[in-house]
Image: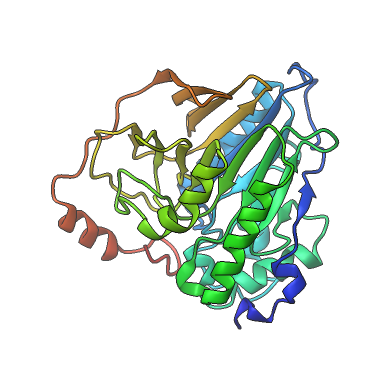
Amino acid sequence: MQWRSVPLFVLVFVGLASASQPATTQPSTQPFDETNILAMGDWGEDTAAQRQVAAEMARYVQASHKQFTAVLLLGDNFYFRLTGVDDPRWQTLFEQMYDPKVLGMPFYACLGNHDYDGDNFHIELTYAKEHPHSRFKMPAPWYRLNMPHGKPTVMALMLDSNKDNLSELQWNRQINWIKNQLDGPRPQWVICCAHHPMFSNGFFLMNGILQRDWGSLFEKYGVDFYIAGHEHNLQHLEIPGWHESFVIAGGGGAHPHPLFRADRGFSRQAFGFVHLEFTPEKAIVRFIGTDGTILHAFERDTAGNVKILQTTPNSPPQKNALKAYLELRNRKPTTQPAGR
């Protein structure tokens, strides 16, 4: 079933979806004007790594004594063909996996390429609609978030980068929607999220279509961050001539991807997630490993100046890209079909 059956008003809905206020288990010690968000992609493969990332997220949030507004899910939410909204993997791979007592904030999801396997994309949209009390949120294939509720300082556009699964009309409709969101009233910080990266030190070195169709808009309107997954690793790239910071947070637990270059920015073949902390003056982005280590952190001010706060060595690049690619394609999955 194609999502072309989704009503037209849903697809073009200018979703000013405000993230609900999360529950906290510790008294908050953060400044009143600070907004904290987590991000990760490529997670629902039912692996030991997914469980490690989920456990560390809960430990990290609890130890931080901060209030987190949301988790941004960057696609490839399930590597299985779901049987429906009652598939037990909704419970085992999401509702129970991410401790609801600590991670009580909403999880806002994008669609990845594996979410178009079978009828998954439609099931995910339907699950979010039919379970409004679930933390899993996906009101439309693309939508807008203003965070936090009441007096937002961050706007997030949750986008669908799966151009091959969209008609030209749908793709162009989304581009026009992005332009309208960026051209209208907006909070101080702007982040755009989708599954596919524009630049990478891994398999998918660059995505010319996204650079052309989205990148020109992001540059024109001064987007601060583009956050993606698809690469199953962690990266922070600053590309000459581009205003935004490129963050890849694909370490949610799916089988790892190798890296093929280490000469631009930070790139680690590691599992983990990203913590984005916003104040009116600056944003701090931290890459957290499964043992709680800060693998990389940088600061960005409102003018776009970036300063590395701490880092760890990049993973060595694979010397034989073809061999590494074939090994990944021919690997024996640890679970039901995971693809690449």
Residue at coordinates 61% horizontally, 68% vertically from top-left? 173
Indicate the position of residue 225 as horizontal and vertical percent values. 53, 38
Tell me the quadrant of the picture where the N terminus can be found: bottom right
Question: As rendered, which of 146 and 103 lies closer to the eye?
Answer: 146
Question: As rendered, which of 206 and 48 lies closer to the eye?
Answer: 206
Q: Is residue 40 left or right of residue 101?
A: left
Taking 168 as reference, is 45 above or below it? above
Residue at coordinates 57% horizontally, 46% vertically from top-left? 192
Q: Is residue 170 left or right of residue 201?
A: right
User: As drawn, which residue projects farthest toward the left?
Assistant: 320
Numbered circles on residues, count? 0
Is residue 96 in view?
A: no
Indicate the position of residue 32 as horizontal and vertical percent values. 79, 20
Taking 261 as reference, is 193 above or below it? below
Colour scheme of the rendered structure = rainbow
Indicate the position of residue 16 as horizontal and vertical percent values. 78, 51
Q: Is residue 67 left or right of residue 239?
A: right
Tell me the quadrant of the picture where the C terminus can be found: bottom left
Indicate the position of residue 117 as horizontal and vertical percent values. 50, 73
Is residue 317 in view?
A: yes
